[in-house]
Amino acid sequence: MSEESIGDKFLRKLYEKTVKNGIESIDRDEIGNEIGMINMQMDNLIDELTSDGYIKKKGRTKIYLTDNGRKRAEF
């Protein structure tokens, strides 16, 4: 069994914190802190997940899942 990627961990945690709780968006630092990411690492991951169409940014620090992000997080 392969280890879950950091991107998948991030998307799953974002899904748990938003979709499962009926919240539209959440501060990216809250997700990063819960999975043990440092800021520079998180900046790169957020840019990658945004570019890949899995999340969208809302303001400076809020993020939310796109439909594709939800599908990937639900697997």
Image (cartoon, rainbow, N blue to C red):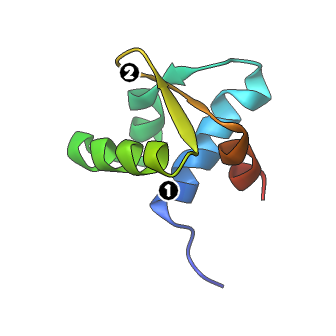
| Left or right: 59 as drawn, with respect to 55 | left
**Residue shown at 65%/36% (left/top)?**
66
- Looking at numbered disc 1 in the image, what kind of residue is underneath it? Gly
Residue occupying the far top of the picture: 59
Residue occupying the far left of the picture: 40
On the image, the x and y values in percent for residue 43 come to 29, 41
Hey, which quadrant is residue 53 in on the image?
A: top right
The mark found on residue 7 in the picture is: 1
- Looking at numbered disc 2 in the image, what kind of residue is underneath it? Thr
| Left or right: 54 as drawn, with respect to 43 | right
**Quarter in which the C terminus is drawn:** bottom right
The mark found on residue 61 in the picture is: 2
On the image, the x and y values in percent for residue 70 come to 72, 43
> Above or below — where is 17 with respect to 44?
above
> Mark 1 falls on what kind of element?
helix
**Quarter in which the N terminus is drawn:** bottom right
Q: Earlier in the sequence, mark 2 or mark 1?
A: 1
> Above or below — where is 41 with respect to 26?
below
> Mark 2 falls on what kind of element?
loop
On the image, the x and y values in percent for residue 54 come to 58, 45
> Above or below — where is 8 with respect to 12?
below
